[in-house]
């Protein structure tokens, strides 16, 4: 089952190559796959790419990245993401904490 994150990133690359823009759902799904496969660095990179591309992140997106950082023992990064959510007016929920 490992390696799903690689397929998700390849799919996003294929979409980009074919002129299909990624949206919030696409990014969130790829981030979630990275989170499930323990790829916290890739999850962080995806949310950075997402925000740089001006694709809006939502609670689901942030929760997946926060969870990925938590699984990778990256607690300071997780806390920074919670602060970023607050700064951007994105509501946290019970999954966030």
Image: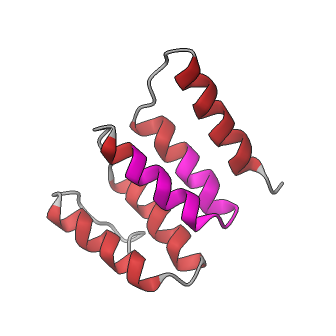
How far from the left and from the top, in percent, is residue 54? 28, 38
Q: Which quarter of the rendering shows the C terminus?
A: bottom left
How far from the left and from the top, in percent, is residue 33? 63, 52
Please identify the quarter of the rendering in which residue 2 is found: bottom right
**Residue 90 belongs to the span the image colors magenta:** no
How far from the left and from the top, in percent, is residue 91? 23, 60
Residue 75, above or below 54: below
Residue 75, above or below 15: below
How far from the left and from the top, in percent, is residue 29? 55, 44
Q: What residue appears at the point 24 percent right and 73 percent down from the top-left corner?
A: 83
Figure label count: 0
Q: Residue furthest top?
A: 18
Camera-side residue: 41 or 78?
Answer: 41
In this picture the colour scheme is: secondary structure
Camera-side residue: 4 or 95?
Answer: 4
Q: What residue appears at the point 56 percent right and 65 percent down from the top-left corner?
A: 41
Q: Which quarter of the rendering shows the N terminus?
A: bottom right
Q: What residue appears at the point 15 percent right and 65 percent down from the top-left corner?
A: 87
Q: What residue appears at the point 19 percent right and 67 percent down from the top-left corner?
A: 86
Query: Magenta residues?
Result: 30-49
Residue 78, above or below 91: below
Main secondary structure found in the magenta portion: helix
**Residue 34 belongs to the span the image colors magenta:** yes
Q: Residue furthest right?
A: 1
């Amino acid at each position: 089952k490992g390696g799903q994150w690689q397929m998700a990133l390849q799919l996003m690359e294929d979409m980009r190559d074919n002129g299909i823009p990624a949206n919030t759902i696409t990014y969130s799904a790829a981030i979630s796959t990275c989170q499930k496969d323990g790829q916290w660095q890739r999850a962080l990179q995806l949310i950075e790419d997402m925000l740089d591309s001006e694709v809006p992140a939502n609670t689901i997106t942030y929760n997946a990245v926060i969870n990925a950082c938590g699984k990778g023992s990256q607690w300071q990064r997780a806390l920074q993401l919670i602060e970023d959510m607050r700064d951007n007016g994105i509501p946290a929920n019970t999954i966030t904490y």
